Amino acid sequence: MGRGQTAAAGEPILRVDNLGKRFNTLTAVDAVSFEVRARECFGLLGPNGAGKTSIIRMIYGFSPPGSGSLRVFGLDVATDWRRIRSRIGVCQQDNTLDPDLSVFQNLLVFAGYFRIPRRLAGERADELLHFFALEKKREAKVGELSGGLARRLTLARALINDPELIVLDEPTTGLDPQSRHLLWERLHALRARGKTFILTTHYMEEAAQLCDRLVIMDNGKILVEGTPDGLIEAHVGHSIIEIRGANQEELKQFLGERNVAFDEMAERLVIYSNGNTEIEQTLRTGFHPRQCTFRTATLEDVFLRLTGRELRE
Amino acid sequence: MIRPSNISWRFLSVWHRNLIVYRKIWKVNFLVPLLEPAFYILAFGLGFQGLVDGLAYAGQPLTYTRFMAPALIAISIMYNSFFETTYASFVRMYYQKTFDGMMTTPLSLEEIILAEIVWSATKATAAALIMTLVLGLFGFVTFPQGLLIIPLAFLGGLAFGAVGMFFTGITPSIDMFNLPIFLFITPMFLFSGTFFPVSGLPDWAQSVALIFPLYHLVELTRYCCLGLVEVNPLVSIAFLVVFGLCFLVLGLTSMRRRLIK
């Protein structure tokens, strides 16, 4: 594969190969490989400190890759970062909106950094304000915006250069449900326009909603990769039973004999019953209904199963 | 390491951003250089008149206020640029995360930092120009050569802006700027031939003053205003250029080390 000017046909939008990053003695990213294809929404999931943000920062060329390679649109970030950045939009975790400028000026000035001609920048800024329902805040100061509005503006700003790839680092953290749903809806609309996404999130519901494929990371490594449904099927099955109450030795033995996987928590047993009717029947009769919860498995179960249920920080 | 290939004219878009913010409160920004020289001239002119008969500078007798007035411009250049790249840049870098946002666009860190320094020089130039006009009204500046202060202020602003950026690159917190101000800015403010001629100092102190960038800037502003100098103006210009370039490199390096992980 030569150093093409643009991504060749079939070339993934983003190709990460054996990527590593160390900070002194800490290995933040450890030989990570994955690909993001055109028009796909790809998720990076993992607990705090898993290495998600480190990867994101290397993608947009903020921090240089420690080892391995990283190509965006077939271009090398180390040498072609400027061209790459002109074609991507980044929504950072922190609020990096310019508090010295108004909402509209934030978009205009940012467009200036991309050298977008003033008239076109103005048109795009107005379009984006409309798209994110921010028209009424056009002249407002950024400091006066609520968390949800600020995040919408951050996303609008990330789109000012009409990027092909949109990088979202925890786009909905700290937002109320209304704001979060509005943002999801807008992201879906953008996907319909053919944009490619890579996002990190702590919300499994969000990942299941938005991502076509995702990886779950921990301690700088990728644990699993797949579609949300595929991962649920492969790692926790489609149904789960939770039993509350202490002293479940007998039950654990029973499950052990039948090779049924379960996780033990302080006052709870999470049983990966996966539609096993014998188990379900036994538990239904053996326990008080208020002790049992029968539910569908979610991506959150996969996540907790793989990364452990103990606190991280 | 800083890479020259990372520097392009794109830095002007960051400079422009600062100009937009500056224009929002231009009245306040203009008020200080407008009134400051008047305060000093009144205080020293009226207050010191009875104490100081006058002095000799470069072999010429001068009234005290005539001697001091050009130094006010130099001091203002120093303060405007140094405070811009220390406190103001630090706030943008650390509290507002403005640079982080810029780093997602096709701007390099080198361009952002260069723009901050050039902006500080621009701000210093605006202040110096206003002060020159005000002092001109008092009759302390001879025109048209007094207008040479414009390019000179820009050069001086670059030099002090670059030092400020270097301190921003290494300071652990915003409160620690007190240290370079106390150890670097204040001694220069007092001993650079600003309020009394350096020739009145002991020999060793005169030599020390020669390595102060403010001394050279004061020499040059005095040359622009009065046509008098103690040091060859070309030497002073060369000193400021070299000093500015050294700290430009140091500033870029320290900021790269600080921000790129």
Image (cartoon, coloured by chain):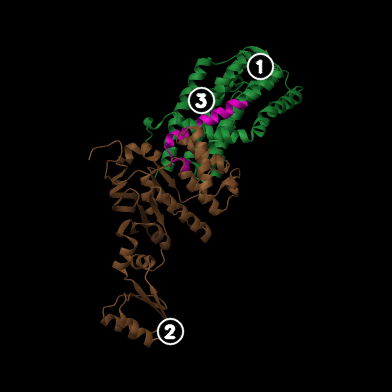
| Residue density around tag 1, few if under 14, some if 14–19, many if 20 or more, within 10 Å | many
The front one of A189 and A309 is: A189
Closest to the camera, between mark 1 and mark 2, is 2
**Residue B88 x/y as whole percent:** 56, 38
Residue B241's mark? none
Relative to A245, is B65 above or below?
above
The C terminus of chain B: image quadrant: top left
| Residue density around tag 2, few if under 14, some if 14–19, many if 20 or more, within 10 Å | few
The disc, 1 or 3, on the residue closer to the chain's N-terminal end is 1
- What type is the residue that disc 3 sits on? Ile
**Residue B238 x/y as whole percent:** 48, 19
The residue segment tinted magenta is: B99-127
Relative to A264, is B39 above or below?
above
Residue B211's mark? 3
Q: Residue furthest left?
A: A1
The residue that mark 1 highlights is B141
Chain ID at mark 3: B
The front one of A59 and A296 is: A296
Chain ID at mark 2: A
Residue B120 part of the magenta segment = yes
Disc 3 vs disc 2: Cβ atoms closer than 8 Å? no
Residue A289's mark? 2
- Chain letter for brown? A
Residue B183 part of the magenta segment = no
